[in-house]
Image (cartoon, helix red, strand yellow):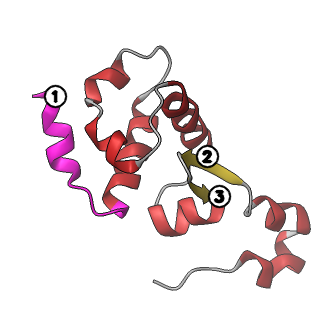
Amino acid sequence: MDMINASEHQQFLGAAFVNRQKEIVLRIGSRQWTRSQLVQVIGVGNWAAAAKLSTVLRKMKVISLAQLYAVDPRDFALIPRLGETTVFVAMAVLKAEDFNVSTWIKQIA
């Protein structure tokens, strides 16, 4: 997939927008994704949900994708105001990193 390079369109989009695309919005341990990577690599653009996921995982002491995959998805439902969009971001990250999301979600059955 060809990714759009926002900096190539800075004159139209503006410097503030272009610079914000480089902001890290999701961290899982030492792994991190910028706004641009979240959209163009992971396939989701909800930066608020990504930031919430980063915070939740940090508090849960989840520092790797393998540890995220080991979390029972039901645990996310117990976190007030987390929301399904944040869980969707977790699903999208796992899928992009070749984890079996269907198997992960079936833990709730």
Name the residue located 46 percent from the left edge and 36 percent from the top edge: 86
Residue 46 within the magenta-colored segment of the rendering: no
Mark 1 — residue?
A: 108
Amino acid on which the number 2 mark rests in the picture: Trp
Residue 3 in the image: x percent, y percent? 57, 80
Residue 88's place in the image compared with 18, above or below, is above
Q: Is residue 73 rendered to the left or right of residue 11? A: left
Place residue 11 in its image quadrant. bottom right
Start and end of the magenta stretch?
96-109
Q: Give whichever of discs 2 and 1 has the lower sequence position.
A: 2
Mark 3 — residue?
A: 35
Q: CA distance from mark 3 to mark 2?
A: 7 Å
Mark 2 — residue?
A: 47
Instruction: Select label 2 or label 1 by which is in front.
Output: 1
Residue 99 in the image: x percent, y percent? 26, 56
How crowded is the residue under tag 2: few (<14 C-alpha within 10 Å), some, or many (20+)? Answer: some
Q: Do the residues under discs 3 and 2 have CB atoms within 8 angstroms? A: yes
How crowded is the residue under tag 1: few (<14 C-alpha within 10 Å), some, or many (20+)? Answer: few
Q: Is residue 69 rendered to the left or right of residue 22? A: left
Residue 44's place in the image compared with 68, above or below, is below
Amino acid on which the number 3 mark rests in the picture: Arg
Residue 13 in the image: x percent, y percent? 82, 71
Q: Give whichever of discs 3 and 2 has the lower sequence position.
A: 3
Q: Give SS at disc 1.
A: helix
Residue 35's place in the image compared with 105, above or below, is below
Q: Give SS at disc 3.
A: helix
Q: CA distance from mark 2 to mark 1?
A: 26 Å
Q: Pick whichever, 86 or 66, lies toward us.
A: 66
Q: Give whichever of discs 1 and 3 has the lower sequence position.
A: 3
